[in-house]
């Protein structure tokens, strides 16, 4: 098995960023999501930083690929997805789960390394959801 140093470094930096931003702390996340109560806007800065980083890198990657590629690339290397019922339902379920638990998959996996019980419960139920989805999807 070949070790991908770039992927390992990226994962480590991502996990470290989640810890530093306190996104592995469900109380902090729920404070951000509580816009009608005592709203904590600090995670908004984390999200803005992530969007700026992603959009900048996307532009650089697209430019480099267009410059070095022999074939025509459309506006973006990243394909545009259509908005359909599956996307809307999936997004709603993700949002409901995030709002109820204060965790999403990335921070929950990082939380496993810290031994957080909530992260273990989240990840177990996440994999149960994967299993149920696969069972339902096979029946079609």
Image: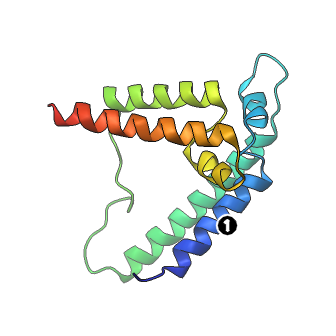
Q: Secondary structure at mark 1?
A: helix
**Left/right of residue 38 with respect to residue 23 in the rendered view:** right
Residue sticking out furthest to the left: 140
The image shows residue 115, relative to residue 101, as above or below, that is below
**Where is residue 46 drawn, in percent x and y?**
73, 48
Image x and y of residue 38, in percent: 85, 22
Q: Position of residue 100 (x, y in %)?
A: 62, 24
Please name whichever residue, 115 or 54, is drawn nearer the observer in this view of the structure.
Answer: 115
The one of 37 and 137 positioned closer to us in this rendering: 137
Instruction: Please determine whether, in this image, residue 33 is positioned above or below residue 19.
Output: above
Q: Which image quarter: residue 88?
A: top left
Residue 107 visible: yes
- Residue 84 in sight in this render: no
Q: Nearer the viewer, residue 72 or 122?
A: 122
* Direction from residue 8 to residue 3 in the image, left or right: left
Q: Residue extending furthest top?
A: 36
Quadrant containing the C terminus is top left
In the rendered view, tell whether residue 34 sits above or below residue 67.
above
* x and y, in percent, of residue 25 in the image: 75, 41
* Tag 1 residue: 13
Q: Which residue is found at the position 25% from the left and 75% from the top? A: 71
Crowding near the residue tagged with mark 1, few <14, some 14–19, many ≥20 C-alpha atoms within 10 Å: few
Please tell me in which quadrant of the rendered image residue 95 appears.
top right
The quarter of the displayed image where residue 102 is located: top right
- Picture residue at 32% right of the left edge, 79% below the top: 69
- Asked whether, in this view, residue 61 is left or right of residue 81, the answer is right
């Amino acid at each position: 098995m070949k070790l991908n140093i770039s992927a390992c470094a990226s994962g480590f930096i991502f996990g470290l960023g989640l810890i530093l931003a306190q996104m592995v702390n469900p109380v902090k996340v729920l404070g951000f999501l509580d816009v009608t109560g005592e709203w904590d806007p600090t995670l908004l800065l984390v999200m803005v930083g992530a969007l700026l980083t992603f959009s900048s890198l996307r532009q650089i990657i697209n430019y480099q690929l267009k410059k070095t590629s022999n074939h025509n690339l459309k506006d973006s290397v990243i394909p545009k997805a259509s908005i359909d019922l599956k996307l809307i339902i999936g997004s709603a379920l993700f949002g409901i789960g995030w709002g109820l638990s204060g965790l999403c998959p990335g921070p929950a996996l990082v939380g496993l390394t810290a031994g957080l019980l909530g992260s273990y419960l989240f990840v177990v139920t996440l994999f149960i959801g994967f299993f149920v989805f696969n069972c339902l999807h096979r029946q079609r």
